[in-house]
């Protein structure tokens, strides 16, 4: 029955949905559930998922989109905002984990090449899982959240460089040609980076500006660009992952990156499901069991050693022990990049299946454990705080500098820059209000940016996009859209993001106004009626002035 690919996909999706629901009930990461489903469906289980070109294709597409989205989020401004701590902590943690992990691997009897792979795999933390957990806790905009995102970006850059190095090594026919292959791949890489810079500066911004008039066309282009980048990267001798990453970087500086990234999240997660299913299905459970002892040792090192080195570096730089502890917990795991790195080593012939099983088992243990550590980070800190004093300087000068940064503040988020919205925005600015305006028309956004507004291209219906806005700063969210469906979606999205400030929406009719008042909206604007009322008030004021003038003339 399951020889039919359509039946295979149906079985995978059905069991993955059931496994995901169970994981959600047990508060386990979905990645763990999907790998477990893959094991259940693979040769070690029911044998439903065998070698399938279609499933492998979906998995490769998911990985390409994963790297593309990471490239989209490569915002150098984040690293500048939190100062050198992101760079120093990211590189320091990578160096410490690589060296100590390598020594542990050698002590366990591994060969040098295998030890290097395992050590490097232990250094990378899951940007996606951590950002998701921090978002769920509303801590992305906190100081430790900003620092964590900063050094995770540093890790992402390092893993791409490692992939380039491994690809060059794998392409060398023998030791004598390794240097030549390395120089060739570096030359190709330089040309690729130059092409990315030129495209970013001269081609992609005007092209995206035109495509953004249609959200469907913009998303189609983004997906095509990601796959094209992956294809070019593979054709030039790099991995598909490197090409997809650079494709994301090429549009990371445009005004459309948040919307593109938010819209691709669901598709990326759906396709990545097949990667984790395939990974679990390819695991040999007999071999995996042989690695239990080594996996426990490496897992304890990741769960304890990685947070400690982050706390040491941040404490030395003048941060409080609480900030260092909360940021350190975010690296207490290995990431999907580690699994991709292990798979790359297997394809290059550097690793065997048992080592891939070891890295995967470490991933299962650390991702599960660190999820609980991050979710209950404040409770953990309350218990461990008395023992963490030596991670903190007596004067934590650095933290105060970052808390009082120069980020531009926002009082009001205003959706819609049409005639009504633009008038409101102009009037609020005259009164000294700090506004960030959001509109779905790229031309309008560009015009208002030229006039000195904080303006962003985005979709009020997209809850993922709302999560990128400074909702914690804003005391008021205003919608001038006058669309019942859009305003409902906006209210629901604000609720999902935990927004607690005031909300004002615009409607076209009084019944809609009453509906939104019942939903708890603080202020409802009916543009035409309000404009007529304002005009009537002005006429009344003029009449009163005329009457007063006539009365004074009659008395005279």
Image (cartoon, grey):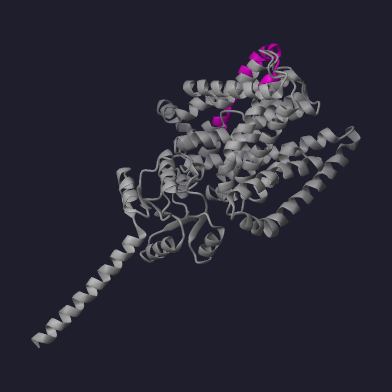
Q: Is residue 448 visible?
A: yes
Which residue is painted at 64% across and 44% down in the image?
71
Q: Is residue 416 above or below residue 289?
A: below
Q: Position of residue 447 (x, y in %)?
A: 53, 64
> Taking 153 as reference, is 173 left or right?
right
Q: Position of residue 104 (x, y in %)?
A: 67, 22
> Taking 433 as reference, is 225 left or right?
right
Q: Is residue 320 above or below residue 482?
A: above
Which residue is painted at 64% across and 31% down in the image?
272
From which residue to which does the magenta span run? 280-309
Quadrant in the rendering for residue 178? top right
The residue sitting at the left extreme is 555
Location of the N terminus (image quadrant): top right
Q: Nearer the viewer, residue 28 or 273?
A: 273
Dominant secondary structure of the residues highlighted in magenta in the image:
helix
Q: Nearer the viewer, residue 32 or 219?
A: 219
Which residue is painted at 81% across and 26% down in the image?
349
Count all numbered tags in the image, as a single digit: 0
Q: Nearer the viewer, residue 360 or 479?
A: 479
Quadrant in the rendering for residue 165? top right
As for residue 406 lying within the magenta part, the answer is no
Location of the C terminus (image quadrant): bottom left
Quadrant in the rendering for residue 304? top right
Q: Position of residue 61 (x, y in %)?
A: 69, 35
Q: Is residue 300 visible?
A: no
> Taking 472 as reference, is 160 left or right?
right
Q: Nearer the viewer, residue 79 or 307?
A: 79
The residue sitting at the bottom extreme is 556
């Amino acid at each position: 029955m399951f020889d039919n690919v359509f039946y295979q996909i149906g079985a995978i999706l059905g069991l993955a949905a059931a496994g995901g629901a169970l994981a959600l009930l047990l508060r386990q990461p979905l990645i763990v559930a999907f790998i477990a489903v893959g094991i259940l469906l693979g040769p070690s289980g029911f044998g439903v998922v065998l070698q399938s070109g279609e499933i492998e294709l979906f998995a490769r597409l998911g990985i390409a989109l994963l790297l593309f989205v990471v490239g989209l989020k490569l915002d150098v401004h984040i690293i500048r905002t939190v100062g050198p701590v992101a760079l120093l902590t990211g590189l320091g943690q990578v160096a410490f984990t690589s060296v100590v992990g390598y020594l542990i691997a050698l002590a366990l009897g591994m060969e040098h090449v295998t030890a290097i792979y395992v050590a490097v795999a232990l250094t990378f933390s899951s940007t996606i899982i951590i950002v998701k957990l921090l978002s769920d806790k509303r801590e992305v905009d906190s100081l430790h959240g900003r620092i964590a995102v900063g050094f995770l970006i540093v890790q992402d850059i390092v893993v791409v460089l490692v992939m380039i190095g491994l690809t060059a090594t794998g392409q060398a026919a023998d030791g004598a040609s390794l240097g030549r292959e390395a120089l060739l791949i570096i030359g190709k890489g330089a040309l690729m980076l130059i092409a990315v810079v030129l495209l970013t500066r001269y081609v992609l911004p005007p092209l995206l500006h035109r495509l953004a008039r249609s959200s469907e066309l913009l998303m189609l282009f983004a997906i095509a660009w990601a796959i094209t980048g992956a294809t070019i990267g593979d054709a030039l001798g790099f991995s598909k992952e490197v090409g997809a990453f650079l494709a994301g970087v090429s549009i990371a500086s445009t005004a459309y990156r948040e919307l593109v990234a938010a819209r691709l999240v669901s598709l990326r997660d759906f396709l990545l499901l097949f990667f984790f299913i395939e990974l679990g299905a390819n695991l040999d459970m007999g071999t995996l069991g042989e690695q239990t002892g080594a996996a426990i040792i490496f897992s304890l090192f990741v769960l304890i050693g990685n947070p400690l080195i982050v706390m040491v570096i941040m404490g030395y730089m003048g941060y409080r022990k609480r900030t260092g502890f909360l940021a350190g917990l975010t690296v207490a795991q290995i990431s999907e990049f580690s699994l991709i790195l292990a798979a790359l080593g297997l394809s290059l012939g550097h690793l065997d299946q048992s080592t891939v099983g070891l890295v995967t088992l470490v991933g299962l243990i650390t991702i599960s454990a660190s999820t609980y550590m991050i979710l209950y980070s404040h409770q953990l800190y309350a218990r461990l705080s008395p023992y963490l004093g030596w991670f903190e300087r007596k004067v934590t000068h650095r933290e105060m500098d970052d808390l009082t940064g120069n980020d531009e503040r926002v009082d009001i988020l205003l959706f819609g820059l049409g005639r009504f919205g633009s008038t409101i925005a102009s009037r609020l600015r005259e009164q000294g209000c700090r506004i960030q305006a959001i509109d779905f028309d790229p031309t309008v956004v560009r015009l208002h940016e030229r006039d000195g507004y904080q303006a962003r291209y985005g979709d009020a219906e997209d809850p993922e996009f709302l999560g990128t806005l400074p909702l914690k700063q804003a005391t008021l969210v205003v919608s001038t859209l006058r669309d019942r469906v859009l305003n409902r979606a906006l209210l629901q999205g604000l609720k999902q993001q935990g927004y607690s400030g005031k909300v004002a929406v615009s409607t076209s009719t009084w019944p809609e106004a009453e509906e939104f008042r019942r939903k708890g909206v603080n202020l409802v604007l009916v543009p035409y009626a309000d404009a007529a009322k304002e005009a009537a008030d002005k006429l009344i004021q003029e009449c009163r002035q005329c009457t007063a003038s006539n009365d004074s003339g009659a008395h005279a």
